[in-house]
Image: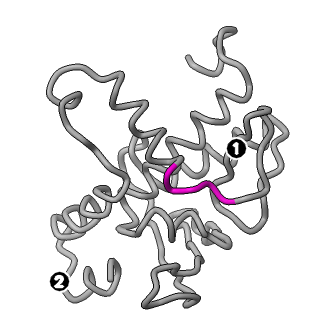
Amino acid sequence: MLLNSSKVSPIQIFIYATDQALLKALFFAGDRAADLLQGVGCSLIPDNSVFLFNHIWTKTSRSGDANVFASKRGPNRLICPVRGLEMYFMISGSLGVQLAPDFLICPVTKSDSVSPRSLESTAAQSRLKLYTSSCSGRLLSKNLTIHGFRSGADVFLALEGVSLHEIMDHVG
């Protein structure tokens, strides 16, 4: 298991926890990475089935508008965005990492400390590129982007039977 490996440093464990939480949240949120990364808080509702995200839209046409949306717990623990965020918070706490209260995902600085600033979407794209470059076969030849994750939420919601009107309200 990754966490038991003596070859993986605590900061690398934090980075892996951050990446898996971010990629799962992005895929199921249907949101722009830049907006999701400007999260100003999230909370798990009492029955532990849904994370509520509160963030500020940064796109010019909506600049400064607050947006709250929910991410529901899924049956597959490997891809569930709620489980991914729980793991991120649990690992951060176990490592003694103080997360910035104003941002959902915090980056690691060049000096291996956790920044009090928000992770930039360009950094998230670099992390995705790092993972896809280590893949073989057909995935290696694809140019996957963080922005492309937005369509994953649309498809998932449609397959779950969510109305087109509700999907449009969610993804904008």
**Residue at the spot 80% in from the left edge and 38% down from the top edge:** 113
Query: Up-down: is 75 above or below 162?
Result: above
In which quarter of the view is residue 74 placed? bottom left
Residue type, label 2: Leu
Q: For the C terminus, give its image quadrant.
A: bottom left
62 versus 127 height, above or below:
below
Q: Quadrant of the N terminus?
A: top right
Q: Nearer the viewer, residue 71 or 136?
A: 136
Quadrant position of residue 101 = bottom right
Residue in the picture at 50% in, 41% down: 20
The dot on residue 90 is: 1
Q: Is residue 120 magenta?
A: yes
Q: Main secondary structure of the magenta part?
A: loop
**To which residue does mark 2 refer?**
164
- Which comes sooner in the sequence, label 2 or label 1? 1
The region drawn magenta spans: 118-122
Instruction: Please give left or right for residue 66 compared with residue 128 in the image.
Output: right
Location of residue 27 in the rendering, given as x and y in whole percent from the top left corner: 36, 56
Q: Of helix, strand and loop, which one carries label 2?
A: helix
Number of residues whose C-alpha sits closer than 10 Å to that of mark 2, classed few (under 14), some (14–19) or many (20 or more): few
Q: Amino acid at mark 1?
A: Met
